[in-house]
Amino acid sequence: MAEDDFRRWEREFDSGAPREEPSGGRGMVLVAGLTATGCTAMIAMGEVPLGAAGLVLSSIILLLWRIGM
């Protein structure tokens, strides 16, 4: 469940509160790059429907990952 904005605001003034962990943005960029490269290679090899489906599916997964679902 998402944390409310007021608690985030309070945490800025609470010096003893633990810092939030990084969201893993670097990993997400790496996965997106590798997936796009793989799907582009599939399209270049002639498997256009499979490559396009992979790009669409990976885009949906990365979007859901980014918004936190």
Image: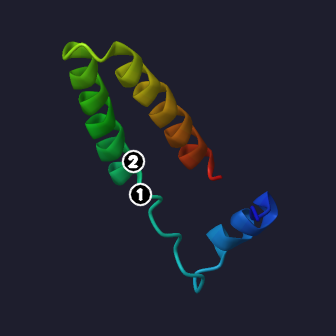
Identify residue type, mark 2: Met
Q: Secondary structure at mark 2?
A: helix
Q: Position of residue 1 (x, y in %)?
A: 76, 65
**Residue occupying the far bottom of the picture:** 16
Give the residue number, with chain letter if any, for mark 1: 24
In the rendered view, would you say 5 is above or below 19?
above
Q: How is the image coloured?
A: rainbow
Where residue 10 appears, as percent x and y from the top left, is 73, 70
Quarter residue 52 falls in? top left
| Figure check: 53 above or below 26 | above
Q: Is residue 16 above or below residue 68?
A: below
Q: Residue at x 62, y 45 (%)?
A: 67
Q: Position of residue 32 (x, y in %)?
A: 36, 38
- Regarding mark 1 in the picture, which secondary structure is present there? loop
Label 1: how many Cα within 10 Å (few below 14, some 14–19, many 20+): few
Residues marked 1 and 2 touching at CB (< 8 Å): yes
Task: Say few, some or many: other residues with alpha carbon within 10 Å of mark 2 (under 14 / 14 to 19 / 20 or more).
Answer: some
Q: Residue at x 67, y 72 (%)?
A: 11
Q: Residue at x 21, y 14 (%)?
A: 44
Per the image, the residue denoted by label 2 is 28
Write the residue at 72% across / 63% down: 9
Q: Is residue 56 left or right of residue 32?
A: right
Of residue 22 and residue 55, the one placed in the foreground of this image is: 55
Depth check, front residue: 16 or 29: 29
Which of 34 and 43 lies nearest the eye of the viewer?
Answer: 43
